[in-house]
Image (cartoon, rainbow, N blue to C red):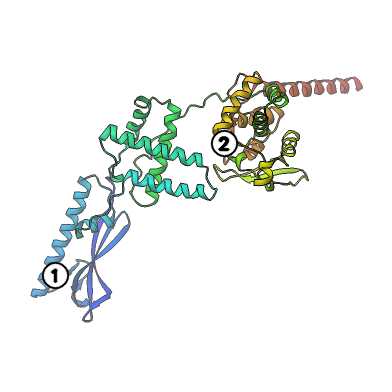
């Protein structure tokens, strides 16, 4: 993109490493924003005849006049190409100016091409277990949304990366919230994907500057549903007569007491259980979504659930820790369990993870720094989104404060009487 403050300079010099018939060749150096490239003029001259300050060949010979004329024309021609690139609002680099002068057409990378490259590399990480398949699926949906926008807005199936402007992402946001009927938070997910892909294109050197660098994605923190301890125990103790429901219930309760997301609990194996620094059993593995380490000491209830399934045929044959259904079946069975247990909430692995962050840990005075480590978060700011302060937490803290204040008052009264 055009930069009004770009620096541009041209310099002729003798390249003594490129000689012909013992004479050095005159080269032209093009410099844009401190980065430079060089072009041979194919002309040679005796060093004693070269004026480096004036950048011309000394003397009135026909050869001197011919070389000087060529240098003047070459310099003017390259300067003209620089101004043309500026007028076309193109990303200007020293290489781009040189290529324009030499008539070399650079391959124009496109937005959809960037999406395909980005998503293909992500899929390779999924294949080796470094990323979650669901995350890759979301990237592919993001690509489809951008393609739909291109057709709606420009009647095109692609667009050169160099032609992207800030207005593109603003118009894409408008398209998602109006034509696609998305909420602001849902649209933000796809806006972030677009920014991620374009940022990668900059890193790959396909475009010079990020046209979306100044665009801020707005996200409103939703009210995250979680279970109370009474609801957790009601589900855990429910007498379910159908085996498939009992298995799903146990996996769900396991997630409530460990904070594992669906993809992580699905991939847990028996050898993920190890003895921790305290001599107790822990689960140590990296989160599939972020590849961050997640180290969780096992509480009595998840330990009991693990022992319950150690001889389960599916676990014995595959080495998996628990018999976890497909995500679709898992969520469908959770709806049945909610009805049977009379819990009027939408049960998902997300509610289980939120329950772990609040009901199981924070409400029992586990520091938020510890909760962040248990959830495998990179930043404590992410944990703060999951872990809202609840009324039970406030009550527990105030009760503890009340006892301390009463104790302090009693100690002072005793000291006064002693005197």
Q: Given this view, does label 2 or label 1 mark the residue nearer the observer?
A: 2
Q: Nearer the viewer, residue 256 or 88?
A: 256
Quadrant in the picture for the N terminus: top left
State how far apart marks 2 and 1 are (Cα): 76 Å
User: Is residue 167 visible from the viewing direction of this image?
Assistant: no
Residue 59 % position (x, y): 12, 74
User: Is residue 67 visible from the viewing direction of this image?
Assistant: yes
Name above or below for residue 146 compared with residue 392: below
The residue that disc 1 covers is: 67
Residue 380 as seen in the image, left or right of residue 124: right
Q: Quadrant of residue 235?
A: top right
The residue that disc 2 covers is: 326
- At 62% across and 22% down in the image, what residue appears? 338
Residue 164 as seen in the image, left or right of residue 277: left
The kind of secondary structure element at disc 1 is helix
Residue 397 % position (x, y): 71, 24
Residue 242 % position (x, y): 67, 27
Quadrant in the picture for the C terminus: top right
Few, some or many C-alpha atoms within 10 Å of disc 1 (few <14, some 14-19, many ≥20)?
some
Name above or below for residue 81 compared with residue 189: below
The kind of secondary structure element at disc 2 is loop
Q: Quadrant of residue 402?
A: top right
Name above or below for residue 389 compared with residue 5: above
Q: Quadrant of residue 184?
A: top left
- At 47% across and 42% down in the image, what residue appears? 136
């Amino acid at each position: 993109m055009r930069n009004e403050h770009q620096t541009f300079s041209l310099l002729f010099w003798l390249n003594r490493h490129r000689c012909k018939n013992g004479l050095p060749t005159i080269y032209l150096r093009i410099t844009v924003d401190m980065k430079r490239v060089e072009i041979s003029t194919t002309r040679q001259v005796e060093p004693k005849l070269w004026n480096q300050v004036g950048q011309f060949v000394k003397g009135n010979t026909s050869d001197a006049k011919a070389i000087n004329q060529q240098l003047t024309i070459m310099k003017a021609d390259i300067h003209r190409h620089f101004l043309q690139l500026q007028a076309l609002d193109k990303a200007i680099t020293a290489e781009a100016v040189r290529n324009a002068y030499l008539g070399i057409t650079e391959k124009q990378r496109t937005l959809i091409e960037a999406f395909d490259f980005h998503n293909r590399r992500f899929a390779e990480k999924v294949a080796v277990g470094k990323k979650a398949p669901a995350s890759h699926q979301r990237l592919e949906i993001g690509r489809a949304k951008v393609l739909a926008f291109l057709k709606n807005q420009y009647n095109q199936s692609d667009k050169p990366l160099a032609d992207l402007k800030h207005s593109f992402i603003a118009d894409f946001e408008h398209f998602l919230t109006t034509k696609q009927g998305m909420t602001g938070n849902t649209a933000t997910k796809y806006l972030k994907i677009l920014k991620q892909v374009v940022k990668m294109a900059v890193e790959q050197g396909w475009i010079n500057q990020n046209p979306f660098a100044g665009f801020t994605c707005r996200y409103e923190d939703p009210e995250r549903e979680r279970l109370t301890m009474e609801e957790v125990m009601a589900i855990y103790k429910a007498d379910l007569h159908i085996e498939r429901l009992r298995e799903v219930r146990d996996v769900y309760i396991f997630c409530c007491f460990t904070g594992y997301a669906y993809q992580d609990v699905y991939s847990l194996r028996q050898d993920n259980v190890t003895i921790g620094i305290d001599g107790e059993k822990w689960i140590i593995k990296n989160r599939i979504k972020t590849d961050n380490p997640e180290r969780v000491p096992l509480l009595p209830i998840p330990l009991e659930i693990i022992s319950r399934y150690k001889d389960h045929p599916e676990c014995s044959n595959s080495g998996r820790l628990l018999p976890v259904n497909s995500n679709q079946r898992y969520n469908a069975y959770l709806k049945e369990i909610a009805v049977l247990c009379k819990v009027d909430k939408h049960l998902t692995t997300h509610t289980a993870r939120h329950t772990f962050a609040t009901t199981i840990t924070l409400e029992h005075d586990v520091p938020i720094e510890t909760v962040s480590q248990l959830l495998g978060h990179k930043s404590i700011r992410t944990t703060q989104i999951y872990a809202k302060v609840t009324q039970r937490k406030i009550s527990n803290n105030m009760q503890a404060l009340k006892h301390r204040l009463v104790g302090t008052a009693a100690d002072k009264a005793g000291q006064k009487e002693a005197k």
